Structure formats: structure tokens, C-alpha cells
């Protein structure tokens, strides 16, 4: 089945450190890929999306992700973590009939 | 722009009763709305897809008679959990799509349902 796999259910980094959240997709054809952020008890907000226009995608709040076909990866990065980045992050892919399939999520904690 | 609201944000109901959750697109018309369910510390699971004026399409394993979805207008969809039981307690999130771009979905803030 076509899916996305997020490695690491919980990632903790120090404030100011690099943030790296991992996502791998399974597909023979490069899909639409997304990263969403969810703050506690809230809905999801789109951080960025890959639509095959460019392999390096820049999103909101300083996040970016690079599509690597050879590695079937779409990892999310941010050069310097901020306390406000603490949240749940979901990698997702487009599926049939405009559906979005979400990964299991990675909780990002920021240490002062 | 592209704001989606849900009401209520939190509801407690007794086992056996029904509860209705509303999802509204406030500043755009939504040709398609999606309903998701999220258990604590888990991912979002798509329950159903609804298009305005037509019956919802339910994902495999979702009881359509238990989770009634109505998409009566281009700005409103409702999810009714009928004869709720404690195992229905969850966080329900809707999203709305204007249909202008592939996979363009705007998410509501969610509704936390607790069935006692």
C-alpha cells in the first residue's frame, strides 16, 4: 500500500539546534508530499508541499524539506529550533480521490 | 483566508445519545469536505469524504449508520455520531477543500468528544 513512514515518534532538540524530522514514502511514482504541524488540541496547518516543481521546498516558519527520489525521502529541516516549534508534525502524501494519507506523526520537543 | 471552523470544540455526552458536530468553511466554498478521527498521540485517520449535495463516501471499516455525514451546502458539513459509546471518544477533525488545487485541504480546529 502507498504510505509514508515517519522515523522517530519523538524528537527532542535544544533551542537553536538543527531540527531534522524524517519521512520516507513508498511509491513507484513521485507523489504529492506534505508536511503539516499540529499544535495541542488544534487542527493541522500546512507547512509545505512538494508537487514535483522543485526538489527543495521552502515552507512557513523557516522550515524546508528536500525531496530525494533516490532515497524515497522527504525530510523536514529547520536550521535553528525555537521554543514555539514544539508541536506534532505529520508527513503526508496525496492519494486517490484527493485524499491525504498521514504518517504516524513525530512529536518535537524543544529544550531550553 | 481559508478558515474552517468546527462547533462545538468540546462535547461530553452520555452513552447512547447522539451528538452532532458542525464544520464550516467561513470564507470559501468547499466542494469537498473530509472527516478525520484522531486518537490520543496517533495520526489522523480518514473516516469519510463528502461532496455537496451527494452521499458521503466512507472509508473501509467506518460504520456509515453510526457516523452520519451531511454536506447540505458548500459551506457546511455535519457529522452526527449516533448512539455514542465510550469507544467513540476521540478527537474529530474536519477539512474543507475549495477544489482549486490538488489535495488542497484546510483543517478545522477539531472537536473533542467524550462519551461517558
Image (spheres, coloured by chain):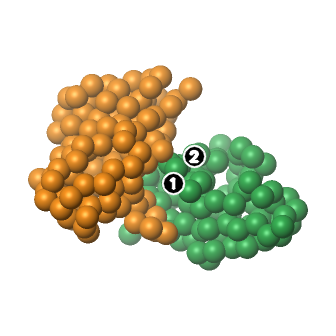
Left or right relative to B21: residue B44: right
Colour in which chain B is drawn: orange
Q: Quadrant of the C terminus of chain B?
A: bottom left
Task: Please name the residue shown 59% across and 61% down the image.
Answer: A88
Left or right relative to B64: residue A13: right
Q: Is residue B53 at all visible to an observer of this figure?
A: yes
- Nearer-the-camera pick, A10 or A4: A10
Q: Name the residue under label 2.
A: A45
Residue B18 in percent (x, y) is at 17, 50
Residue A108 in percent (x, y) is at 67, 66
Name which quarter of the figure residue A59 lies in. Answer: top right
Task: Please name the residue shown 40% across and 66% down the image.
Answer: B39
Q: Is residue A32 at all visible to an observer of this figure?
A: no
Q: Which mark is residue A41?
A: 1
Name which quarter of the figure residue A40 lies in. Answer: bottom right
Residue B59 in percent (x, y) is at 25, 57
- Nearer-the-camera pick, B46 or B99: B46
Circle 1 marks a residue in which chain? Answer: A
Discs 2/1, front: 1
- Nearer-the-camera pick, A22 or A82: A82
Amino acid at each position: 500500500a502507498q504510505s509514508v513512514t515517519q522515523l522517530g515518534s519523538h524528537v527532542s532538540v535544544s533551542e537553536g539546534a538543527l531540527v531534522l524530522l524524517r519521512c520516507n514514502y513508498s511509491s513507484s511514482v513521485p507523489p504529492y508530499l506534505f508536511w503539516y504541524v499540529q499544535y495541542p488540541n488544534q487542527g493541522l496547518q500546512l507547512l509545505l508541499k512538494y508537487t514535483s516543481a522543485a526538489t527543495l521546498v521552502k515552507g512557513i516558519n523557516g522550515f524546508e524539506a528536500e525531496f530525494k527520489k533516490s532515497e524515497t525521502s522527504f525530510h523536514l529541516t529547520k536550521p535553528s529550533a525555537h521554543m514555539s516549534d514544539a508541536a506534532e508534525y505529520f508527513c503526508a502524501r496525496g492519494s486517490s480521490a484527493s485524499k491525504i494519507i498521514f504518517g504516524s506523526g513525530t512529536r518535537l520537543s524543544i529544550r531550553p | 483566508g481559508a478558515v474552517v471552523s468546527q462547533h462545538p470544540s468540546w462535547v461530553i455526552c452520555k452513552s447512547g445519545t447522539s451528538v452532532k458536530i458542525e464544520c464550516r468553511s467561513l470564507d470559501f466554498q468547499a466542494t469537498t469536505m473530509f472527516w478525520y478521527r484522531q486518537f490520543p498521540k496517533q495520526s489522523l485517520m480518514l473516516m469519510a469524504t463528502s461532496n455537496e449535495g451527494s452521499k458521503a463516501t466512507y472509508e473501509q471499516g467506518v460504520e456509515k449508520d453510526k457516523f452520519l455525514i451531511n454536506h447540505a451546502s458548500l459551506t457546511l458539513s455535519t457529522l452526527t455520531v449516533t448512539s455514542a459509546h465510550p469507544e467513540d471518544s476521540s478527537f474529530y477533525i474536519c477539512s474543507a477543500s475549495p477544489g482549486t488545487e490538488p489535495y488542497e485541504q484546510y483543517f478545522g480546529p477539531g472537536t473533542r468528544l467524550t462519551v461517558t
